[in-house]
Image (spheres, rainbow, N blue to C red):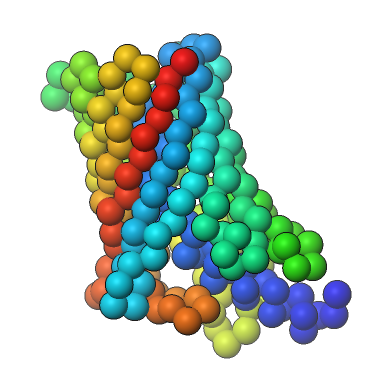
Amino acid sequence: MSYKRFVRKSMYFALIGLCMSCAPTKIVVPLQEGQVQIGATLGRPKVNSGSLPLMGIYAAKGISNATTAYGAAQLSSALFGTIQLDGGVVKGLRPSSGILPGLSYSYGGNLFVSSRDYATRIYPETGFNVFWQQGSHILNLSANTWVDPTWFLTEYNRGQILAPSLGAGYRLRYKWIEFQTEYKIVNPTREIMIPQAYVPSTFGLGGRGLYWGIALNF
């Protein structure tokens, strides 16, 4: 692959990555040891004057009561000719107790593979969650950011080393089923362009929108 083509491909993946980071927070409170959760997500961030439906699936397992590992596939990326997989770990720092919130953090990575020429990129990711849990009810505030190791290679100064997001959500974890909803602001620090679409910048609050999920616990 020539250098110019590599630069263009880096820009393409960066732009698609910034858009596809519009996924809801999968795990806020770590699962119990041995517990398995399988879920599907749907997001509708604001793009142009409407919204862009983003669909994904994921699976998670409690490695211990304080550590959960997960893997996911973002189905909407295929519309852009890109296979996107992500995975990582969520670790609990402390549980929620009364009015005192629980804390957890996550780390992992996102793999992008072009279905056209098999070009590949990896983007590390990290996040932090504050949550209040009362029985089956969970409220959360979350912050997350992607890291683009090739941000300096993109054309026209479109590169961005960090792609942050902020979210506030509620989830009902009742026995074998969990319902999730979250309002998320993605990449509020700049304007980005994806094919035939525009995502607003800081004063437009980025790719803001509602996200939903449903999961089964085993």
The image shows residue 114 at horizontal and vertical percentages of 71, 63
Q: With respect to residue 198, does 134 lie above or below? A: above
Q: Is residue 99 visible?
A: yes
State the residue in front, 203 or 195.
195
Vertical placement of residue 108 versus 196, above or below: above
Indicate the quadrant where residue 179 lies: top left
Check the image and name the residue furthest to the right: 1
Q: Quadrant of residue 100?
A: top left
The quarter of the picture where residue 198 lies is bottom left
The answer to whether residue 124 shows anywhere in this view is no
Residue 88 position in % (x across, y down): 57, 37
Q: Is residue 210 above or below residue 178?
A: below
Return the x and y of residue 12 as percentages of the image width and height. Answer: 62, 73
Residue 16 in percent (x, y) is at 55, 67
Q: Quadrant of the N terminus?
A: bottom right
Pick out the residue farthest to the bottom.
Answer: 156
Which residue: 47% across, 15% down? 218
Observer-nearest residue: 105 or 84?
A: 84
Task: Please name whichever residue, 39 or 137, is drawn nearer the observer in this view of the structure.
Answer: 39
Left or right: 195 with respect to 189? right
* Residue at (34, 78) in percent of width and height: 48
| Side of 118 relative to 15 (left or right) | right
Instruction: Identify the residue shown where x is 28% and y is 19%.
Output: 174
Number of marks:
0
Q: Is residue 4 left or right of residue 205?
A: right
